[in-house]
Amino acid sequence: MIRFVLNLLWLIFGGGIVLALGYGLAALVCFALVVTIPFGVASLRLAAYSLWPFGRTLVPRPGAGIASGAANVLWVLLAGWWLALSHLVAGLALCVTIIGIPFGVANFKLVPAALWPLGQEVVESP
């Protein structure tokens, strides 16, 4: 029940809708450029994760090979570093207030996802 309440508050006040729309727009651009479709799939995964982060976690996907690792290096160079930095800055800003600490922690959870999204999958936390 607490996860549901935190996710609902995240959607309204924590920026979950804005983050999901941003990642969704990036996915549409990646799908339009046919070569970047794997990055579009990763962006959709990030959109879903940023929309409802509490009670979910990111784990390595079994069977992800060297191609996803190479694509992650390209992702980090082009988009991942500034996405991770923005989540880090937003998380630090939210942790300034006591009420914002859970939202700051959610932003910190999104840092590795934004930095290295390919070869990962979002699963329910135990």
Image (cartoon, rainbow, N blue to C red):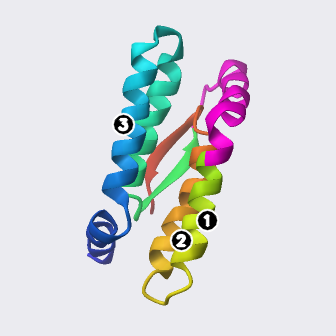
For marks 1 and 2, the one nearer the N-term is 1
User: Which residue occupies 43% across, 38% down?
Assistant: 45
The answer to which of marks 1 and 3 sits earlier in the sequence is 3
Query: How busy is the neighbourhood of tag 3: few (under 14 within 10 Å), some, or many (20 plus)?
Result: many
Relative side of 121 to 74, left or right: left
Residue denoted by label 1 = 89
Q: Amino acid at mark 2?
A: Val
Residue 105 appears at what percent x and percent y?
53, 71
Is 46 or 64 nearer to us in this picture? 46
Residue shown at 37% from the left, 62% from the top: 15
Q: Is residue 66 magenta?
A: yes
3 or 2: mark nearer the eye: 3
Residue at mark 1 to residue at mark 2: CA–CA distance: 12 Å
Query: Where in the figure is residue 72, as x and y percent of width and height?
Result: 67, 30
Start-end of magenta stretch:
61-82
Q: Amino acid at mark 1?
A: Val
Disc 2 residue crowd, few under 14, some 14–19, many 20+, Cα 10 Å: some
Image quadrant for the C terminus? bottom left
Q: Nearer the viewer, residue 88 or 52?
A: 88
Residue on which disc 2 sits:
105
* Front tag of 1 and 2: 1
Q: Quick check: 116 above or below 15?
A: above
Residue 24: mark in rendering: 3
Rendered location of residue 104, percent (x, y)? 52, 72
**Residue 28 in the image: above or below residue 20:** above
SS of the residue at dot 1? helix
Quadrant (top left/top right/bottom left/bottom right) for the N terminus: bottom left
